Structures are given as C-alpha cells and as structure tokens.
Amino acid sequence: EAEVAQSPRYKITEKSQAVAFWCDPISGHATLYWYRQILGQGPELLVQFQDESVVDDSQLPKDRFSAERLKGVDSTLKIQPAELGDSAMYLCASSLRSGVTMNTEAFFGQGTRLTVV
Amino acid sequence: AQSVSQHNHHVILSEAASLELGCNYSYGGTVNLFWYVQYPGQHLQLLLKYFSGDPLVKGIKGFEAEFIKSKFSFNLRKPSVQWSDTAEYFCAVVMDSNYQLIWGAGTKLIIKP
C-alpha cells in the first residue's frame, strides 16, 4: 500500500540551530500539506502546496520557517533558527486533490517529532 | 471564520458501552467530512468520510457517522466499543471555498477494560 514517507522520525536539536524535515507524498498526489501538531491539539496547517505552488501559507511563521516543493513531488520544511516553542510533531499529508475536485481524502505520514532543547 | 468544533476533549467509557462523539462545523456551502483516528504512537488514519449521497456513512472497525446538514453536524458513533478503540479522534472538514482541510481539536477516548 502506498504511503507518505517522512524523515527523520525523531529529531533533537538545540535552540537557534537549523533543522529540516523531508516528505515524499504518495505518487501522483498533487496536493501536499505540512501540519504541526502540538500534544493534545489537532493538526495546524502550516503550508499547502498544489503541485509546486504554495496555495496557503498564512499560518507559516515566515521569519523562521520555509517550505519548498521544487518539482512538485517531494517537499522540505525548514526551521531556522529553531526555538523551544517549535517542539511538536510535524506531519506531512498528501491528497489527489487537483483543484477541480475536492472529493479526496488526505493520507498522512508517520510524522517527525521535533524536540528543541 | 470557518471552524470545526468537537464537543468533548476527553471521553472515558467501559467496554461494550455505546459511543457518540460530536462534530460541528461552521460553513454554509458544500463540504467533505472526515473522521481520522490516531492510535497511541501511530499516525493519523482515515476512519470514514462523507462526500455526497447517503448521509449515514459506515467506516472501518464498526464506526459510522451521520451527516445532518441542517445541524452542520457529523457525529461519530459506535454501538459497542472495545479496549482497542482507545485513541484520539479528529473530525476534519474540507469546504469548497478554499479546499482547506480544517481540523477539530480532537477527542481523547479511553476505554476501560
């Protein structure tokens, strides 16, 4: 069964350091999401890509976070510099949604648990 | 603003009890509705979804949900829960205004053996 791949699974970094997460969506999925999930809360959308274009990054703290999906396939989310409050689970999801239909679900990866010390 | 509300943050039940978790959304247009489950230490998995048609949707593991458009609700039900249903349950909605997936805060379900 096709899956969304994320790496690393766990990351511990010191504050003020740079950290990057990688996501490979299910083949053929046009839409890719990066979410942050703090313990006890629902996922919070950071950025949504449609192919290689950003369609929503309104909740992305752009002073320290960046995301790219250069070829419209895999994606990288970067934090520089990391702060203590960035400790959370970072989730990647993908869906077939192409902009002409909304009738598809999102499939999630295992996530990257980030701890900033 | 468009939002999704889950009424209970924590629910504790005994095995064999019936379950109903509430989900309401605030949007008057066309929606897709989802329930996702997150078992301890695992990733989010789709439990069931509603796109159109029969408003009573059956999902995996004996779960079902009913879309009541007039009440803007999509409550999750299971007639008899098991210890293995212990997990966190999230309601999510896609609205045709921007195709964004809006999430509820989640409900932690604990089933006592």
Image (tube, coloured by chain):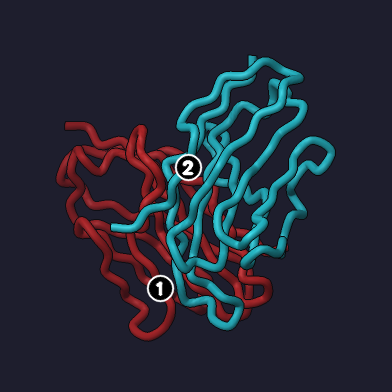
The quadrant in which residue A31 appears is: bottom right
Q: Write the residue at 74% across / 54% down.
A: A57
In the current view of this chain or complex, which residue is farthest to the right? A63
Q: Give me the chain letter of mark 2.
A: A
Q: Is residue B90 left or right of residue A53?
A: left
At label 1, which amino acid type do we have?
Answer: Tyr
Q: Are marks 1 and 2 in contact (CB under 8 Å)?
A: no
Q: Secondary structure at mark 2?
A: strand
The C terminus of chain A is located in which quarter? top right
Q: Give the x, y percent position of residue B41.
A: 36, 33
Identified by mark 2, the residue type is Gln
Counting from the top left corner in percent of width and height, residue B57 is at 31, 72
User: Vertically, is A52 above or below A87?
Assistant: below
Q: Residue at x 77, y 26 (%)?
A: A81
**For residue B91, above or below residue B39:** below
Which one is nearer the viewer's eye here, A86 or B13? A86
Label 1 marks a residue whose chain is B
Crowding at label 1, few (<14), some or many (≥20) Cα neighbours within 10 Å?
many
Report the residue at 25% width, 43% height from top: B85
Badge nearest the viewer, 1 or 2: 2
Where does the image place residue B79, in percent across and percent down from the top left?
20, 57
Asked whether residue A50 appears in the rendered view, the answer is yes
Q: Is residue A15 above or below residue B12?
A: above
Colour assignment, chain A: cyan
Residue at the (56%, 59%) spot, across then down: A73
Read off the residue under disc 1.
Answer: B50
- What color was chain B assigned in the picture? red
Q: Is residue A42 visible?
A: no
Distance, label 1 to label 2, CA atoms, is: 27 Å
Marks 1/2 same chain: no
Quadrant the N terminus of chain A occupies: bottom left
- Which residue position holds label 2? A6
